[in-house]
Image (cartoon, helix red, strand yellow):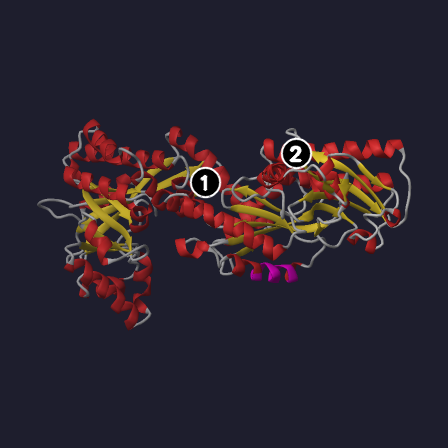
Amino acid sequence: MFLCGMPAGQTASGEEARLAALHQLNLLDTPPSESFDRVTRMAAKIFDLPIAAVSLTDRDRQWFKSRIGVDHSSIPREKAPCGEVTDTGDLLIIPDLAADACYASSLLGQNGIRFYAGAPLTTRDGYVLGALCVLGTEARAVAADEVDALCDLAAMVMSQIELQHAFGRVDPLSGLPNRSQLMEDLGDLALDKAGTARFAVMVDLGQSHDIESISRIIGSTPIDQLVRDAAGILRTILGQDCNIYHVATTKFVFLSPPDVGEAAYLDFLSAALQATRKGENSAIGITTAFGVVPLVHGKTDCTDMLRALNSAAYEAHFTASSISVYSDAMDEIHRRRFRLLRDFEDALQAGDQLRIVYQPRVGLSDRICEGAEALLRWRHPQFGDVPPGEFIPIVERSCFGKALTTFVLVSALKQLRAWKQAGLNLQLSVNVSACNLSEEDFAGEVASALAEHQVTAEALELEVTESAVMRDTRIALKHLHALSRMGISLAIDDFGTGYSSLAYLQQLPAQIVKIDQAFIRNLGKGERERTLVRSMISLSHDLGYRVVAEGVETGPEADVLQDMGCDEAQGYFFARPLEVEAFERWLATHRRPASGCGAADQTINE
Protein backbone atom coordinates (compact mmCIF):
# COMPACT_ATOMS: atom_id res chain seq x y z
CA MET A 1 0.00 0.00 0.00
CA PHE A 2 1.21 3.51 -0.85
CA LEU A 3 0.57 6.47 1.46
CA CYS A 4 0.53 9.71 -0.56
CA GLY A 5 3.55 8.80 -2.66
CA MET A 6 5.57 6.98 0.01
CA PRO A 7 5.86 3.28 -0.96
CA ALA A 8 5.54 0.74 1.81
CA GLY A 9 8.38 -1.36 0.42
CA GLN A 10 10.79 1.40 -0.65
CA THR A 11 14.30 0.87 0.73
CA ALA A 12 16.73 3.61 1.65
CA SER A 13 19.47 2.06 -0.49
CA GLY A 14 17.17 1.90 -3.52
CA GLU A 15 16.20 5.55 -3.17
CA GLU A 16 19.84 6.61 -2.76
CA ALA A 17 20.75 4.74 -5.93
CA ARG A 18 17.89 6.44 -7.79
CA LEU A 19 18.97 9.87 -6.52
CA ALA A 20 22.57 9.16 -7.54
CA ALA A 21 21.39 8.30 -11.06
CA LEU A 22 19.35 11.52 -11.20
CA HIS A 23 22.19 13.73 -9.96
CA GLN A 24 24.72 12.18 -12.35
CA LEU A 25 22.64 13.45 -15.26
CA ASN A 26 23.22 17.08 -14.16
CA LEU A 27 19.62 17.99 -15.01
CA LEU A 28 18.58 19.57 -11.72
CA ASP A 29 18.67 23.37 -11.56
CA THR A 30 19.70 23.75 -15.18
CA PRO A 31 18.08 26.31 -17.50
CA PRO A 32 14.98 25.38 -19.53
CA SER A 33 15.56 23.68 -22.87
CA GLU A 34 13.47 24.16 -25.97
CA SER A 35 13.69 20.43 -26.76
CA PHE A 36 11.92 19.65 -23.46
CA ASP A 37 9.54 22.60 -23.71
CA ARG A 38 8.37 21.37 -27.10
CA VAL A 39 7.22 18.05 -25.59
CA THR A 40 5.52 19.81 -22.68
CA ARG A 41 3.55 22.05 -25.05
CA MET A 42 2.45 18.98 -27.03
CA ALA A 43 1.19 17.28 -23.86
CA ALA A 44 -0.84 20.33 -22.84
CA LYS A 45 -2.40 20.56 -26.32
CA ILE A 46 -3.29 16.87 -26.53
CA PHE A 47 -5.13 17.00 -23.18
CA ASP A 48 -6.41 20.54 -23.80
CA LEU A 49 -5.20 21.47 -20.32
CA PRO A 50 -3.51 24.68 -19.08
CA ILE A 51 -0.71 23.02 -17.09
CA ALA A 52 2.00 20.52 -18.04
CA ALA A 53 5.49 19.82 -16.74
CA VAL A 54 8.56 17.61 -16.89
CA SER A 55 8.88 17.02 -13.15
CA LEU A 56 12.05 15.53 -11.65
CA THR A 57 11.84 13.99 -8.18
CA ASP A 58 14.69 15.14 -5.96
CA ARG A 59 15.17 14.13 -2.33
CA ASP A 60 12.58 16.56 -0.95
CA ARG A 61 11.19 18.43 -3.95
CA GLN A 62 9.68 18.13 -7.40
CA TRP A 63 11.78 20.29 -9.71
CA PHE A 64 10.44 21.28 -13.13
CA LYS A 65 12.88 20.97 -16.02
CA SER A 66 10.09 22.25 -18.26
CA ARG A 67 6.76 23.80 -17.31
CA ILE A 68 3.68 25.31 -18.95
CA GLY A 69 1.20 27.31 -16.86
CA VAL A 70 3.36 27.12 -13.72
CA ASP A 71 5.10 30.16 -12.24
CA HIS A 72 7.33 28.42 -9.70
CA SER A 73 10.17 26.04 -10.54
CA SER A 74 9.54 23.46 -7.80
CA ILE A 75 7.12 22.22 -5.14
CA PRO A 76 7.70 20.03 -2.07
CA ARG A 77 7.87 16.30 -2.76
CA GLU A 78 5.53 15.49 0.13
CA LYS A 79 2.04 14.65 -1.19
CA ALA A 80 3.13 15.43 -4.77
CA PRO A 81 1.52 13.01 -7.27
CA CYS A 82 4.75 12.98 -9.35
CA GLY A 83 6.50 11.59 -6.27
CA GLU A 84 4.12 8.65 -6.29
CA VAL A 85 4.82 8.05 -9.98
CA THR A 86 8.53 8.01 -9.13
CA ASP A 87 8.08 5.57 -6.27
CA THR A 88 5.80 3.14 -8.10
CA GLY A 89 7.17 3.49 -11.61
CA ASP A 90 3.58 3.37 -12.89
CA LEU A 91 1.25 5.70 -14.74
CA LEU A 92 -0.88 7.67 -12.29
CA ILE A 93 -4.26 9.23 -13.11
CA ILE A 94 -6.28 11.16 -10.52
CA PRO A 95 -9.63 12.18 -12.07
CA ASP A 96 -10.49 14.46 -9.12
CA LEU A 97 -7.99 15.46 -6.45
CA ALA A 98 -10.85 16.86 -4.33
CA ALA A 99 -12.31 13.37 -4.06
CA ASP A 100 -9.01 11.68 -3.28
CA ALA A 101 -8.36 11.11 0.42
CA CYS A 102 -4.62 11.63 0.07
CA TYR A 103 -4.32 14.45 -2.42
CA ALA A 104 -7.30 16.60 -1.47
CA SER A 105 -5.17 18.22 1.25
CA SER A 106 -1.99 18.37 -0.87
CA LEU A 107 -0.41 21.62 -2.06
CA LEU A 108 -1.90 21.05 -5.52
CA GLY A 109 -5.35 20.28 -4.14
CA GLN A 110 -5.32 23.35 -1.91
CA ASN A 111 -4.43 25.53 -4.93
CA GLY A 112 -7.36 24.48 -7.08
CA ILE A 113 -5.89 21.58 -9.06
CA ARG A 114 -8.56 18.93 -9.66
CA PHE A 115 -7.12 16.66 -12.37
CA TYR A 116 -3.70 14.98 -12.64
CA ALA A 117 -2.16 12.49 -15.07
CA GLY A 118 1.52 11.53 -14.95
CA ALA A 119 3.66 9.03 -16.89
CA PRO A 120 6.99 7.85 -15.43
CA LEU A 121 10.36 8.94 -16.82
CA THR A 122 12.38 5.75 -16.59
CA THR A 123 16.04 5.25 -17.45
CA ARG A 124 17.37 2.15 -19.24
CA ASP A 125 18.62 0.94 -15.85
CA GLY A 126 15.13 1.13 -14.40
CA TYR A 127 15.52 4.27 -12.31
CA VAL A 128 12.49 6.57 -12.36
CA LEU A 129 13.56 10.21 -12.53
CA GLY A 130 10.12 11.74 -12.19
CA ALA A 131 7.10 12.21 -14.42
CA LEU A 132 5.72 13.97 -17.47
CA CYS A 133 2.47 15.31 -16.08
CA VAL A 134 -0.60 17.30 -17.14
CA LEU A 135 -2.93 19.08 -14.71
CA GLY A 136 -6.27 20.83 -14.85
CA THR A 137 -8.54 22.90 -12.63
CA GLU A 138 -11.61 20.76 -13.37
CA ALA A 139 -12.22 17.08 -12.72
CA ARG A 140 -12.25 14.93 -15.86
CA ALA A 141 -11.80 11.44 -17.23
CA VAL A 142 -9.15 10.34 -19.71
CA ALA A 143 -9.43 8.49 -22.99
CA ALA A 144 -7.24 5.55 -23.95
CA ASP A 145 -5.60 7.47 -26.78
CA GLU A 146 -4.71 10.29 -24.36
CA VAL A 147 -3.02 7.79 -22.04
CA ASP A 148 -1.06 6.31 -24.95
CA ALA A 149 0.01 9.79 -26.08
CA LEU A 150 1.18 10.75 -22.58
CA CYS A 151 3.29 7.59 -22.31
CA ASP A 152 4.76 8.19 -25.79
CA LEU A 153 5.66 11.75 -24.88
CA ALA A 154 7.29 10.58 -21.64
CA ALA A 155 9.40 8.21 -23.73
CA MET A 156 10.35 11.16 -25.96
CA VAL A 157 11.52 13.09 -22.89
CA MET A 158 13.74 10.17 -21.88
CA SER A 159 15.10 9.94 -25.43
CA GLN A 160 16.02 13.61 -25.23
CA ILE A 161 17.77 13.06 -21.90
CA GLU A 162 19.74 10.18 -23.39
CA LEU A 163 20.61 12.27 -26.42
CA GLN A 164 21.93 15.06 -24.26
CA HIS A 165 23.99 12.94 -21.93
CA ALA A 166 24.85 9.74 -23.77
CA PHE A 167 25.49 11.49 -27.07
CA GLY A 168 27.18 14.67 -25.97
CA ARG A 169 24.51 17.36 -25.71
CA VAL A 170 25.64 18.58 -22.28
CA ASP A 171 29.14 19.82 -21.48
CA PRO A 172 30.45 17.77 -18.54
CA LEU A 173 32.50 20.65 -17.10
CA SER A 174 29.84 23.36 -16.95
CA GLY A 175 26.73 21.16 -16.94
CA LEU A 176 25.27 23.40 -19.66
CA PRO A 177 23.87 22.44 -23.07
CA ASN A 178 26.54 22.50 -25.75
CA ARG A 179 26.82 23.82 -29.30
CA SER A 180 24.89 20.91 -30.81
CA GLN A 181 21.96 21.60 -28.50
CA LEU A 182 22.09 25.29 -29.37
CA MET A 183 21.82 24.54 -33.07
CA GLU A 184 18.88 22.19 -32.50
CA ASP A 185 17.07 24.68 -30.27
CA LEU A 186 17.60 27.47 -32.79
CA GLY A 187 16.06 25.23 -35.42
CA ASP A 188 13.02 24.67 -33.18
CA LEU A 189 12.69 28.40 -32.49
CA ALA A 190 12.83 29.12 -36.23
CA LEU A 191 9.63 27.07 -36.53
CA ASP A 192 7.88 27.91 -33.26
CA LYS A 193 8.86 31.61 -33.01
CA ALA A 194 9.31 32.56 -36.66
CA GLY A 195 9.72 36.32 -37.11
CA THR A 196 10.65 36.97 -33.46
CA ALA A 197 13.60 39.35 -33.06
CA ARG A 198 16.24 38.81 -30.37
CA PHE A 199 19.90 39.38 -29.64
CA ALA A 200 22.34 36.50 -29.41
CA VAL A 201 25.20 37.10 -26.96
CA MET A 202 28.56 35.34 -26.80
CA VAL A 203 30.45 35.49 -23.51
CA ASP A 204 34.18 35.07 -24.24
CA LEU A 205 36.16 34.58 -21.04
CA GLY A 206 39.48 35.35 -22.71
CA GLN A 207 41.34 35.40 -26.02
CA SER A 208 42.40 31.94 -27.18
CA HIS A 209 46.14 32.64 -27.21
CA ASP A 210 45.97 33.94 -23.62
CA ILE A 211 44.06 30.85 -22.51
CA GLU A 212 46.58 28.58 -24.23
CA SER A 213 49.51 30.39 -22.62
CA ILE A 214 47.98 30.16 -19.14
CA SER A 215 47.19 26.46 -19.58
CA ARG A 216 50.76 25.80 -20.69
CA ILE A 217 52.27 27.67 -17.75
CA ILE A 218 50.01 26.77 -14.80
CA GLY A 219 47.90 23.91 -16.15
CA SER A 220 44.22 23.63 -17.02
CA THR A 221 42.78 23.51 -13.49
CA PRO A 222 42.42 27.32 -13.06
CA ILE A 223 40.75 27.53 -16.49
CA ASP A 224 38.34 24.73 -15.57
CA GLN A 225 37.45 26.53 -12.35
CA LEU A 226 37.02 29.77 -14.27
CA VAL A 227 34.54 28.05 -16.60
CA ARG A 228 32.56 26.55 -13.71
CA ASP A 229 32.47 29.88 -11.87
CA ALA A 230 31.36 31.73 -15.00
CA ALA A 231 28.58 29.19 -15.65
CA GLY A 232 27.27 29.68 -12.11
CA ILE A 233 27.46 33.47 -12.32
CA LEU A 234 25.63 33.51 -15.65
CA ARG A 235 22.86 31.26 -14.27
CA THR A 236 22.41 33.67 -11.36
CA ILE A 237 22.39 36.80 -13.54
CA LEU A 238 20.19 35.47 -16.33
CA GLY A 239 17.81 33.34 -14.29
CA GLN A 240 16.56 29.82 -14.82
CA ASP A 241 14.30 30.82 -17.71
CA CYS A 242 17.28 31.75 -19.92
CA ASN A 243 19.07 28.96 -21.76
CA ILE A 244 22.86 29.23 -21.58
CA TYR A 245 24.96 27.16 -23.97
CA HIS A 246 28.62 26.21 -23.53
CA VAL A 247 29.78 26.37 -27.17
CA ALA A 248 33.59 26.32 -26.82
CA THR A 249 36.23 25.96 -24.10
CA THR A 250 35.74 29.45 -22.65
CA LYS A 251 32.73 30.65 -24.63
CA PHE A 252 29.04 30.73 -23.75
CA VAL A 253 26.00 31.82 -25.77
CA PHE A 254 22.55 32.93 -24.65
CA LEU A 255 19.57 34.68 -26.25
CA SER A 256 17.87 37.85 -25.09
CA PRO A 257 14.14 38.00 -24.34
CA PRO A 258 12.06 38.64 -27.49
CA ASP A 259 11.86 42.13 -28.99
CA VAL A 260 14.00 43.98 -26.41
CA GLY A 261 15.41 47.41 -27.21
CA GLU A 262 19.11 47.51 -28.09
CA ALA A 263 20.09 50.40 -25.81
CA ALA A 264 18.36 48.97 -22.74
CA TYR A 265 19.72 45.49 -23.36
CA LEU A 266 23.27 46.76 -23.78
CA ASP A 267 22.95 48.48 -20.40
CA PHE A 268 21.88 45.13 -18.92
CA LEU A 269 24.83 43.38 -20.57
CA SER A 270 27.23 46.00 -19.24
CA ALA A 271 26.09 45.22 -15.69
CA ALA A 272 26.25 41.48 -16.40
CA LEU A 273 29.80 41.85 -17.72
CA GLN A 274 30.96 43.49 -14.50
CA ALA A 275 29.45 40.64 -12.51
CA THR A 276 31.25 37.96 -14.54
CA ARG A 277 34.55 39.74 -13.97
CA LYS A 278 34.32 39.15 -10.24
CA GLY A 279 35.40 35.54 -10.78
CA GLU A 280 38.85 34.01 -11.06
CA ASN A 281 39.63 35.45 -14.50
CA SER A 282 41.02 38.68 -13.08
CA ALA A 283 43.45 36.73 -10.90
CA ILE A 284 45.01 34.92 -13.85
CA GLY A 285 45.22 37.86 -16.20
CA ILE A 286 42.42 37.42 -18.76
CA THR A 287 39.45 39.64 -19.49
CA THR A 288 35.86 38.70 -20.35
CA ALA A 289 34.17 40.27 -23.39
CA PHE A 290 30.66 40.12 -24.88
CA GLY A 291 29.85 39.85 -28.58
CA VAL A 292 26.27 40.72 -29.61
CA VAL A 293 24.45 39.78 -32.83
CA PRO A 294 20.84 40.72 -33.78
CA LEU A 295 18.81 37.80 -35.14
CA VAL A 296 15.31 37.03 -36.39
CA HIS A 297 14.07 33.46 -35.94
CA GLY A 298 13.40 31.84 -39.27
CA LYS A 299 15.49 34.38 -41.18
CA THR A 300 18.95 34.36 -39.58
CA ASP A 301 21.12 31.40 -40.57
CA CYS A 302 22.41 29.65 -37.43
CA THR A 303 25.90 29.03 -38.80
CA ASP A 304 26.23 32.65 -39.93
CA MET A 305 25.06 33.78 -36.50
CA LEU A 306 27.78 31.78 -34.73
CA ARG A 307 30.44 33.11 -37.08
CA ALA A 308 29.21 36.66 -36.48
CA LEU A 309 29.20 36.07 -32.71
CA ASN A 310 32.81 34.96 -32.77
CA SER A 311 33.73 38.04 -34.81
CA ALA A 312 31.90 40.39 -32.46
CA ALA A 313 33.41 38.74 -29.36
CA TYR A 314 36.90 39.02 -30.85
CA GLU A 315 36.42 42.73 -31.56
CA ALA A 316 34.97 43.27 -28.09
CA HIS A 317 38.37 42.49 -26.54
CA PHE A 318 39.73 45.64 -28.20
CA THR A 319 36.94 48.05 -27.17
CA ALA A 320 36.79 50.19 -24.05
CA SER A 321 33.45 48.67 -22.98
CA SER A 322 34.44 45.06 -23.84
CA ILE A 323 31.05 44.77 -25.60
CA SER A 324 30.79 44.78 -29.40
CA VAL A 325 27.64 44.66 -31.52
CA TYR A 326 28.02 42.92 -34.87
CA SER A 327 27.93 45.07 -37.99
CA ASP A 328 28.31 44.46 -41.71
CA ALA A 329 31.55 46.45 -41.70
CA MET A 330 32.99 44.25 -38.95
CA ASP A 331 31.94 41.15 -40.84
CA GLU A 332 33.68 42.39 -43.99
CA ILE A 333 36.90 42.89 -42.00
CA HIS A 334 36.79 39.35 -40.68
CA ARG A 335 35.97 37.91 -44.08
CA ARG A 336 39.04 39.69 -45.46
CA ARG A 337 41.20 38.37 -42.62
CA PHE A 338 40.01 34.85 -43.30
CA ARG A 339 40.69 35.28 -47.01
CA LEU A 340 44.22 36.55 -46.32
CA LEU A 341 44.96 33.66 -43.99
CA ARG A 342 43.62 31.16 -46.52
CA ASP A 343 45.63 32.73 -49.36
CA PHE A 344 48.90 33.02 -47.44
CA GLU A 345 49.74 29.35 -48.02
CA ASP A 346 49.47 29.95 -51.77
CA ALA A 347 51.65 33.05 -51.42
CA LEU A 348 54.40 30.97 -49.81
CA GLN A 349 54.44 28.70 -52.84
CA ALA A 350 53.84 31.29 -55.57
CA GLY A 351 57.36 32.74 -55.64
CA ASP A 352 56.24 36.19 -56.83
CA GLN A 353 53.96 37.46 -54.05
CA LEU A 354 56.23 37.68 -51.00
CA ARG A 355 59.43 39.72 -50.99
CA ILE A 356 61.75 41.49 -48.56
CA VAL A 357 62.61 45.19 -48.60
CA TYR A 358 65.33 46.86 -46.53
CA GLN A 359 65.23 50.00 -44.41
CA PRO A 360 68.66 51.37 -43.37
CA ARG A 361 69.74 51.67 -39.74
CA VAL A 362 72.33 54.37 -39.03
CA GLY A 363 74.69 55.38 -36.28
CA LEU A 364 73.51 58.65 -34.73
CA SER A 365 77.00 59.97 -34.07
CA ASP A 366 78.17 59.89 -37.72
CA ARG A 367 74.95 59.04 -39.67
CA ILE A 368 76.78 56.12 -41.29
CA CYS A 369 75.02 52.81 -41.98
CA GLU A 370 75.09 50.42 -39.05
CA GLY A 371 72.47 48.05 -40.36
CA ALA A 372 69.21 47.77 -42.20
CA GLU A 373 65.79 46.54 -41.20
CA ALA A 374 64.32 44.23 -43.82
CA LEU A 375 60.53 44.09 -43.94
CA LEU A 376 58.31 41.40 -45.39
CA ARG A 377 55.92 42.57 -48.10
CA TRP A 378 52.98 40.79 -49.75
CA ARG A 379 51.51 41.72 -53.10
CA HIS A 380 48.20 39.84 -53.18
CA PRO A 381 46.95 38.95 -56.69
CA GLN A 382 43.53 40.45 -55.94
CA PHE A 383 44.02 42.94 -53.07
CA GLY A 384 47.36 44.34 -54.22
CA ASP A 385 49.90 45.37 -51.56
CA VAL A 386 48.61 44.20 -48.18
CA PRO A 387 49.91 46.20 -45.19
CA PRO A 388 52.22 43.98 -43.10
CA GLY A 389 50.49 45.21 -39.94
CA GLU A 390 47.32 43.61 -41.29
CA PHE A 391 48.46 40.18 -42.40
CA ILE A 392 51.44 39.33 -40.18
CA PRO A 393 49.58 39.25 -36.81
CA ILE A 394 46.94 37.01 -38.38
CA VAL A 395 49.48 34.61 -39.87
CA GLU A 396 51.68 34.48 -36.76
CA ARG A 397 48.73 33.30 -34.65
CA SER A 398 47.85 30.58 -37.17
CA CYS A 399 49.35 27.28 -38.23
CA PHE A 400 51.37 29.22 -40.85
CA GLY A 401 53.38 31.15 -38.25
CA LYS A 402 56.33 28.74 -38.44
CA ALA A 403 56.25 28.72 -42.24
CA LEU A 404 56.34 32.53 -42.29
CA THR A 405 59.50 32.67 -40.19
CA THR A 406 61.09 29.89 -42.25
CA PHE A 407 60.41 31.85 -45.44
CA VAL A 408 62.04 34.99 -44.06
CA LEU A 409 64.97 33.14 -42.51
CA VAL A 410 65.75 31.28 -45.72
CA SER A 411 65.38 34.46 -47.79
CA ALA A 412 67.75 36.28 -45.43
CA LEU A 413 70.36 33.53 -45.58
CA LYS A 414 70.20 33.39 -49.38
CA GLN A 415 70.71 37.15 -49.53
CA LEU A 416 73.60 36.98 -47.05
CA ARG A 417 75.32 34.36 -49.18
CA ALA A 418 74.77 36.41 -52.36
CA TRP A 419 76.22 39.52 -50.71
CA LYS A 420 79.18 37.57 -49.36
CA GLN A 421 79.93 36.21 -52.84
CA ALA A 422 79.79 39.81 -54.10
CA GLY A 423 82.31 40.87 -51.45
CA LEU A 424 79.79 42.59 -49.17
CA ASN A 425 79.90 41.42 -45.55
CA LEU A 426 76.65 42.23 -43.73
CA GLN A 427 74.79 40.96 -40.70
CA LEU A 428 71.03 40.41 -41.05
CA SER A 429 68.57 40.12 -38.20
CA VAL A 430 65.41 38.01 -38.55
CA ASN A 431 62.43 38.58 -36.28
CA VAL A 432 61.28 35.55 -34.30
CA SER A 433 57.63 35.15 -33.29
CA ALA A 434 56.16 33.53 -30.18
CA CYS A 435 55.22 30.35 -32.05
CA ASN A 436 58.88 29.87 -33.06
CA LEU A 437 60.08 30.15 -29.48
CA SER A 438 57.56 27.45 -28.52
CA GLU A 439 58.94 24.92 -31.01
CA GLU A 440 60.78 21.90 -29.67
CA ASP A 441 63.95 22.32 -31.75
CA PHE A 442 63.89 25.88 -33.06
CA ALA A 443 67.57 26.50 -32.23
CA GLY A 444 68.56 23.30 -34.01
CA GLU A 445 66.56 24.27 -37.10
CA VAL A 446 68.32 27.65 -37.25
CA ALA A 447 71.71 25.92 -36.99
CA SER A 448 70.74 23.56 -39.84
CA ALA A 449 69.64 26.47 -42.02
CA LEU A 450 72.94 28.29 -41.44
CA ALA A 451 74.88 25.18 -42.44
CA GLU A 452 72.74 24.54 -45.53
CA HIS A 453 73.26 28.07 -46.87
CA GLN A 454 76.91 28.27 -45.76
CA VAL A 455 76.40 31.35 -43.61
CA THR A 456 78.32 31.88 -40.35
CA ALA A 457 76.38 32.38 -37.10
CA GLU A 458 78.00 35.81 -36.63
CA ALA A 459 76.27 37.02 -39.82
CA LEU A 460 72.82 36.42 -38.34
CA GLU A 461 70.94 38.39 -35.69
CA LEU A 462 67.57 37.34 -34.31
CA GLU A 463 65.01 39.76 -32.88
CA VAL A 464 62.54 38.72 -30.21
CA THR A 465 59.75 40.71 -28.59
CA GLU A 466 59.22 40.76 -24.86
CA SER A 467 55.72 39.33 -25.21
CA ALA A 468 57.01 36.44 -27.36
CA VAL A 469 59.50 35.43 -24.65
CA MET A 470 56.90 35.72 -21.89
CA ARG A 471 54.47 33.41 -23.69
CA ASP A 472 56.53 30.42 -22.54
CA THR A 473 59.56 31.77 -20.73
CA ARG A 474 61.24 28.45 -19.92
CA ILE A 475 61.33 27.12 -23.49
CA ALA A 476 62.06 30.56 -24.98
CA LEU A 477 65.10 31.14 -22.77
CA LYS A 478 66.38 27.65 -23.53
CA HIS A 479 66.32 28.44 -27.25
CA LEU A 480 67.80 31.92 -26.86
CA HIS A 481 70.74 30.71 -24.78
CA ALA A 482 71.39 27.94 -27.29
CA LEU A 483 71.35 30.45 -30.16
CA SER A 484 73.64 32.80 -28.26
CA ARG A 485 76.14 29.98 -27.65
CA MET A 486 76.27 29.43 -31.43
CA GLY A 487 77.44 33.03 -31.87
CA ILE A 488 74.14 34.46 -33.14
CA SER A 489 73.39 38.01 -31.97
CA LEU A 490 70.06 38.67 -30.21
CA ALA A 491 68.02 41.88 -30.08
CA ILE A 492 65.02 42.83 -27.95
CA ASP A 493 62.45 44.33 -30.32
CA ASP A 494 59.69 46.85 -29.42
CA PHE A 495 61.24 47.48 -26.03
CA GLY A 496 58.88 49.13 -23.55
CA THR A 497 55.63 47.72 -24.95
CA GLY A 498 55.65 44.32 -23.25
CA TYR A 499 56.71 42.93 -19.89
CA SER A 500 59.79 45.07 -19.29
CA SER A 501 61.50 44.54 -15.98
CA LEU A 502 65.05 44.42 -14.69
CA ALA A 503 64.67 40.74 -13.86
CA TYR A 504 63.45 40.07 -17.40
CA LEU A 505 66.29 41.98 -19.05
CA GLN A 506 68.89 40.21 -16.93
CA GLN A 507 67.73 36.81 -18.17
CA LEU A 508 68.06 37.50 -21.90
CA PRO A 509 71.46 36.89 -23.58
CA ALA A 510 70.86 39.85 -25.92
CA GLN A 511 73.17 42.62 -27.15
CA ILE A 512 70.69 45.10 -28.67
CA VAL A 513 67.62 46.90 -27.32
CA LYS A 514 65.27 48.52 -29.84
CA ILE A 515 63.03 51.24 -28.37
CA ASP A 516 59.54 51.06 -29.87
CA GLN A 517 58.52 53.85 -32.23
CA ALA A 518 55.54 54.76 -30.04
CA PHE A 519 57.96 56.34 -27.54
CA ILE A 520 59.89 58.15 -30.29
CA ARG A 521 56.71 59.77 -31.65
CA ASN A 522 56.08 61.34 -28.23
CA LEU A 523 59.49 63.04 -27.94
CA GLY A 524 58.08 66.38 -29.04
CA LYS A 525 55.19 66.38 -26.56
CA GLY A 526 57.11 67.46 -23.50
CA GLU A 527 59.88 66.94 -21.00
CA ARG A 528 58.12 64.03 -19.31
CA GLU A 529 58.09 62.03 -22.55
CA ARG A 530 61.73 62.86 -23.23
CA THR A 531 62.71 61.85 -19.70
CA LEU A 532 61.10 58.45 -20.21
CA VAL A 533 63.12 57.76 -23.39
CA ARG A 534 66.30 59.10 -21.78
CA SER A 535 65.79 56.73 -18.85
CA MET A 536 65.23 53.76 -21.16
CA ILE A 537 68.48 54.52 -22.98
CA SER A 538 70.42 54.96 -19.75
CA LEU A 539 69.04 51.75 -18.22
CA SER A 540 69.86 49.75 -21.35
CA HIS A 541 73.41 51.11 -21.44
CA ASP A 542 73.91 50.32 -17.76
CA LEU A 543 72.92 46.72 -18.48
CA GLY A 544 75.37 46.51 -21.37
CA TYR A 545 73.00 46.86 -24.34
CA ARG A 546 73.46 48.89 -27.50
CA VAL A 547 70.32 50.99 -28.15
CA VAL A 548 68.45 51.45 -31.43
CA ALA A 549 65.54 53.92 -31.78
CA GLU A 550 62.78 52.84 -34.19
CA GLY A 551 60.51 55.10 -36.25
CA VAL A 552 62.61 58.28 -36.40
CA GLU A 553 60.87 60.53 -38.92
CA THR A 554 62.31 64.03 -38.35
CA GLY A 555 65.69 65.70 -37.95
CA PRO A 556 64.83 67.14 -34.50
CA GLU A 557 63.96 63.63 -33.27
CA ALA A 558 67.32 62.34 -34.50
CA ASP A 559 69.18 65.24 -32.84
CA VAL A 560 67.41 64.74 -29.49
CA LEU A 561 68.17 61.01 -29.53
CA GLN A 562 71.81 61.72 -30.37
CA ASP A 563 72.06 64.13 -27.42
CA MET A 564 70.57 61.41 -25.18
CA GLY A 565 73.34 59.03 -26.18
CA CYS A 566 71.22 56.67 -28.29
CA ASP A 567 73.54 54.56 -30.47
CA GLU A 568 71.53 53.95 -33.64
CA ALA A 569 68.26 54.90 -35.27
CA GLN A 570 66.05 53.99 -38.22
CA GLY A 571 63.03 55.60 -39.81
CA TYR A 572 61.76 57.63 -42.76
CA PHE A 573 64.07 60.53 -41.92
CA PHE A 574 67.02 58.41 -43.05
CA ALA A 575 65.39 56.26 -45.72
CA ARG A 576 62.17 54.45 -46.52
CA PRO A 577 62.16 50.67 -47.02
CA LEU A 578 64.07 49.87 -50.22
CA GLU A 579 64.04 47.01 -52.70
CA VAL A 580 67.29 45.06 -52.59
CA GLU A 581 68.82 46.81 -55.64
CA ALA A 582 67.88 50.27 -54.33
CA PHE A 583 69.25 49.35 -50.90
CA GLU A 584 72.57 48.33 -52.41
CA ARG A 585 72.79 51.67 -54.26
CA TRP A 586 71.96 53.58 -51.07
CA LEU A 587 74.51 51.54 -49.14
CA ALA A 588 77.29 52.45 -51.60
CA THR A 589 77.13 56.09 -50.44
CA HIS A 590 76.44 55.53 -46.73
CA ARG A 591 78.90 52.83 -45.70
CA ARG A 592 82.29 53.06 -44.09
CA PRO A 593 84.94 52.87 -46.81
CA ALA A 594 87.18 50.49 -44.89
CA SER A 595 84.95 47.85 -43.33
CA GLY A 596 81.53 48.50 -44.78
CA CYS A 597 78.18 48.42 -43.14
CA GLY A 598 78.16 46.63 -39.86
CA ALA A 599 74.71 45.10 -39.55
CA ALA A 600 71.57 44.83 -41.60
CA ASP A 601 68.57 44.11 -39.45
CA GLN A 602 65.80 41.99 -40.90
CA THR A 603 62.46 41.80 -39.15
CA ILE A 604 59.15 40.45 -40.29
CA ASN A 605 56.60 42.13 -38.08
CA GLU A 606 56.40 45.70 -39.27
Whether residue 462 appears in magenta in the rendering, the answer is no
Up/down of 342 relative to 297, above or below: above
Q: Residues within 10 Å of mark 1 (few under 14, many from 20)?
A: few
Quadrant in the rendering for residue 585: top left
Q: Earlier in the sequence, mark 2 or mark 1?
A: 2
Number of marks in picture: 2
Q: For the residue marked with disc 2, what is the amino acid?
A: Tyr
Tag 1's secondary structure?
strand
Find disc 2 in the rendering and name its residue. 127
**Comparing marks 2 and 1, which lies closer to the viewer?**
2
In the image shown, does 544 or 148 lie closer to the viewer? 148
Alpha carbon distance from label 2 to label 1: 66 Å
In the rendering, at what x and y percent does residue 245 appear?
59, 44
In the rendering, at what x and y percent does residue 258 appear?
72, 53
Find disc 1 in the rendering and name its residue. 384
Q: Which residues are magenta?
A: 264-271
In the rendering, at what x and y percent does residue 190 appear?
72, 41
* Farthest residue, direction left: 594
Tag 2's secondary structure?
loop
In the rendering, at what x and y percent does residue 229 appear?
50, 52
Residue 215 shown left or right of residue 527 in the figure: right
Quadrant in the rendering for residue 521: bottom left
Which image quarter is the N terminus in? Answer: top right
Does the rendering let one see residue 569? no
Whether residue 266 appears in magenta in the rendering, the answer is yes
